Amino acid sequence: MVNPIPYFARNIWGKWNIQGVILVSLSMQIILIFAAPFRKRSRNTLLVSLLWFTYLVADVTADFCVGLISNKYGDKDTAVSTIDDYLRAFWTPFLLLHLGGPDTITAFSLEDNELWLRHMLGLIVQVCLTGYVFLLTLPDNTLWIPTALVFMAGLIKFAERTRSLQLASLGNFRQSMVHDPDPGPNYAKLMDELKSRREAGLPAEIVTMPEISNQFLDIETEQSDAKPDNQTPDTASMNEIDNPSKQSQEKQTSNSVKSPPDTPKSVRGEEKNSSTTPKGDDVEDLLDLEVIKGAYDYFNTFKGLVVDMIFSFQERSNSRNYLLGRTAVDALRVIEVELNFIYQAFYTKTTIIKSWLGISFRFLSISSVVAALVVFIYEQKRGCEPFDVKITYILLYGAVALEVLSIVMFIFSDYSFALIYSRNSQKISDSDSGTRTGMVTSILNTIFTWVLKLKRPKWTDHKVKKPEWFNNKHYRVLERFVLFRRWSETISAFNLISYCLHKKKKWLDWVIDKIGAKEFVEQWIYEKKMPMLQMLWIFIFTELKRKAGDADDVETIQRICTSRGEWVIQEGDLSRKDLNKLMRYVERNEVTFDECLILWHIATDLLFYEEEDGNQETEEGQNENDGEKQKKKEEQNENDGEKQKKKEGQTENDDEKKKNENEVQDLEQGKHEDGEDGHIELQHFSKLLSDYMLYLLIMQPTMMSAVSGIGQKRFQDTCKEATNFFSKRKSIAAGEKIMNEQLNKRKNNGRPTLNSFISLVGEKTKDLWEKLKKVLRGTRCFGIFFKEKEEGDYSESKLKEACRQLRDVCVDYEPSAVKGDRSKSLLFDACKLAAVINGLGLNETKKWKLIAQVWVELLSYAAANCIPITHVQQLSKGGEFLSLVWLLMTHLGLAKQFQIKEGHARAKLVVSEEYEEKKEQKK
């Protein structure tokens, strides 16, 4: 039988297989160290797929190459005696370095961390194979010194990766959060003492007092130093027990004097000024180093959130007070850095390198590789293949470059800034400014500030052109250079009506569904990236900050976290009748969360495009009257001189009246004005949050698994009904068009005229053009040939027409009463909701403010009830906007994890008050 593999291919593989595979292994490491940091900065599907492929191929290639070398020289007939054999044996420890991987990625997903035992087994097997190949070359190996050095470096690197995976596994991470066992006060001993005293006839009772915080203990020790010598500490403590009211007063004063323990010292001085001087939410008040320090402190405090740890109200109070004193922009800066710390803890080697032991092993690893390079340079290489020598130099220089690059990346990472700044770079006092320590600290602060300035959020003010419904409105958008991002800085979007209009059944869809790639392809085609608006973040921050001010106990926190629109609707100025109509679309007894989300999503679209049509009509009317307005302005300008003289005497009274009117309008209008642009921002906020929440429900079911219910079933049934509705309306329109053509023919007695022939050719050409567009829509060829994007005039016009058709449907009767409850479609229930909102009698600003507040509450409900570990999963894919809201709510105290109200009670046996009164009466 003829061998299907050609002879020249087998010859090339047999001669160059080891060289080729080891160069591929080095290439995989280079791609990983540069591409891995970009996965937290971008949600590009191709980038994630490339990184996934490289991550898997890197380990397989290194394992395969070790097997090739050990198989070649493990044979009894193959002697290891030439310098070329020693050189190939020298390559084996480099594969241990490659298996250790770069510092920028240890795990592609959280599931890789749970497989740390498999990596440990792989470590043992690979070390044994590498040691076996190395021992075969002894004692005649002239390259045994560099081989041993690289072997030690590879062992350290592989062990670092295994240890990082172990620490990042959920079980070990949760165990590291658990403190020492706390049995609490000795209850049995105290009860025995009470019982013995009562049996002895001594009147006694137990006095309980709340636990004294560390802040009070610090002040107590300071006061004890200033006490007179004749007053002992025991006497002072007895006085505190005898006067519990005095102790509570001192505790309150101590809490008001001393700042929260987790608050950076450099920020405490600014907290005092923030309470007196009002600042805008778009102001960056904190320094970059203070942002890093604050985020690092709260990361160490709240990193147990991802494993469902609980926290005390003291920790809640510290975090809440710190964030309430910050602006919205500063809060975003702190939160995104804190999420970056969480990413580094679960997906990189940062947790290993940050310790002194890890730094020592890393220094030993780099020194070993550099020493091996120096020894190899001065080693005799007579009889070696020149190409093999070049490969060895590539491996050595590549290993040194990768190690140096890893150290440089760590030095300029947020982790290193936080560690160095927390230990050596606190705020410099005036007394230390002239010392050597103060000078070094000042230099470090200057360097760190310059580097962190590049990572600072960059808000650019420009017209938003994509998507088209922004209408080129000016917004401040977060647009940082991708190299300095800490997350993707985009908000994903998915629209139900747009999906139904563009969804086409093709044979390719059937194939994609059968191979299990439907979710991946649909997310790639239908997911849209929306800009991160500063005003949207300020609006969300203001709403949550307002609710945090009302959350003083566990019951209120639970109510806020479980509200899905009830809170803001009940706060509104609605009548009892309107309130009952609207509450049935948000109450948990009436609708589930997924049902509520789909209802408000469709209703928001119907109301949004209704406003768009109204705005266009008003713009057209304004354009028609431009000529008349200009004429009137010219006539007014001629009479300005005469009117100005008359107005000079009335300017003072007019100014006072205008001031009073403006003050009244500001009080009535709140933050958003009732003018032309007053409700447009709220419309855009509602539209962004509506599309984002549906994206989470449909395309991120893992994050919403705790609250999604049967959301997928409801979505499919709603899409099916919407598709049938639009196709039927389309067929009716086509039938009316045919009837009109037949009527025209009858008018012309069936004789085709030149005009009818030209119109027929034009219509056929237009239909052919539209069919070609539909075939290429969603592909890159569409933008090349038609010079327009999918979200252009065509898509927007179809959306507006579809929403108009849905608004025209009569919804006087409940859809469930007519259709039954077998189908879970919510299409016409949402039309009913839109009609109810329009019937509330609210002006445009109040109506859209209510809708936007409902969406913020739905967003906060999803963030509070989402499984915490899913936020960590999304950090490796560019991060989610929901994770920012989740962490913001936690810092504001709006989380279910705060369950410890008080600490241990201090209980002591004291003489009862009745016994003391009787004793005084006898005296």
Image: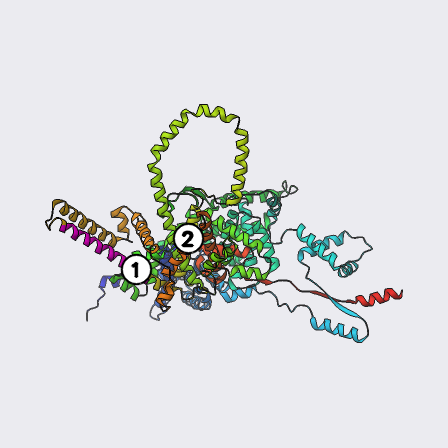
> As drawn, is 337 to the left or to the right of 46?
right
Considering every residue shown, the one lying at the far right of the view is 923
Q: Give the range drawn in magenta.
A: 720-746
- Could you say where residue 41 lies in the image, as x and y percent from the top left? 42, 52
Residue 659 image-quadrant placement: top right
Query: Callout 2: few (<14), some (14-19), or many (20+) C-alpha neighbours within 10 Å?
Result: some
Q: Is residue 754 above or below residue 43?
A: above
Residue 245 is a magenta residue:
no
Q: Which amino acid does label 1 sit on?
A: Phe
Q: Measure the alpha-carbon separation of dots 1 and 2.
A: 23 Å
Type of secondary structure dominating the magenta stretch: helix
Query: Callout 1: few (<14), some (14-19), or many (20+) C-alpha neighbours within 10 Å?
Result: some
Mark 1 secondary-structure assignment: helix
Residue situated in front as seen by the camera: 429 or 54 = 429
Going from the N terminus, do you reach mark 1 or mark 2 first?
1
> As drawn, is 683 to the left or to the right of 660?
left
Instruction: Quickly name the residue at label 2.
Output: 838
Instruction: Quickly name the residue at label 1.
Output: 725
Mark 2 secondary-structure assignment: helix
Q: In this view, does 472 lie above or below 262?
A: above
